[in-house]
Image: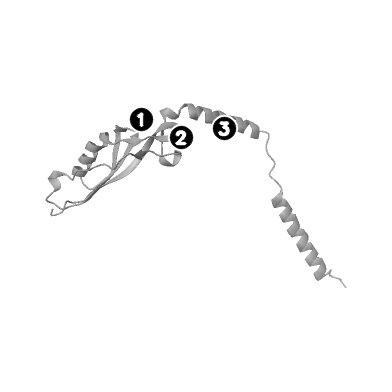
Amino acid sequence: MSNEPTLSPFRALYLTFAAAAAVVLACAVDKPQSPDRSRQTITSQENAVESAQSLSANTFFEFQVAKPASLRETPHLKYPASMRGSGVSGEVVAQYVVDQTGHVDVSSFKVLNSSGPEFTAVVKEVLPTLQFDAAVIRGKRVKQLVQQAFQFTAPPGA
């Protein structure tokens, strides 16, 4: 005859609580830090210093700056004369760099989407006249890549 051991309900409950306590304890313990951790901190500080020194040379995206470049006034876009009779509205989505002085670097101009070359020509003509408050990182003016949509509405009676 063989006697199979049985687990009493009290003992099963006790083992369940012990296992749960061990899991909670394991989750609460901090991960040990490697000895290289201090070297990583020094390296990241050195990188921060180097990046601060090269801020003026870099161009940043809007999400990377503390204060993004902002237009001082709304641009006045003239509806293209060659399109007046068409009654067509249009849009130009452009990308360009605003430098530390708040001026557009026209050589960086790129069309991402356009309703037509006539609308694009108007945007190219207006860009050099736009004035911005330059983007800022850590109190220093920096270059920022700007993406902007320019809307053209057909004049009434067109």
Q: Residue furthest right?
A: 1
10 or 125, which lies in front?
125
Label 2 vs label 1: CA separation?
14 Å
Circles 2 and 1: CB atoms closer than 8 Å: no
First of labels 2, 1 by sequence position? 1
Residue holding disc 1: 101
Amino acid type at mark 3: Ser
Residue 1 found in image quarter = bottom right
Amino acid type, mark 2: Ile
Crowd rating for badge 3 (residues with CA inside 10 Å; few <14, some 14–19, many 20+): few
For label 3, the residue is 44
- Distance CA(mark 3)–CA(mark 1): 30 Å
Q: Residues within 10 Å of mark 2 (few under 14, many from 20)?
A: some
Observer-side mark, 3 or 1, equals: 1
Badge 3 element: helix
Residue that carries the numbered disc 2 in the rendered image: 137
In the drawing, does residue 148 fall left or right of residue 45? left
Q: Spatial distance from mark 3 to mark 2, Cα to Cα?
A: 18 Å
Q: Which of the two labelled residues, at mark 3 and mark 2, occupies the earlier sequence position?
A: 3
- Which residue occupies the foreground of this view, 79 or 29? 79
Residue at 48% in and 26% down: 53
**Residue 116 percent coordinates (x, y):** 20, 46
Q: Name the residue at 71% across, 48% down.
A: 29
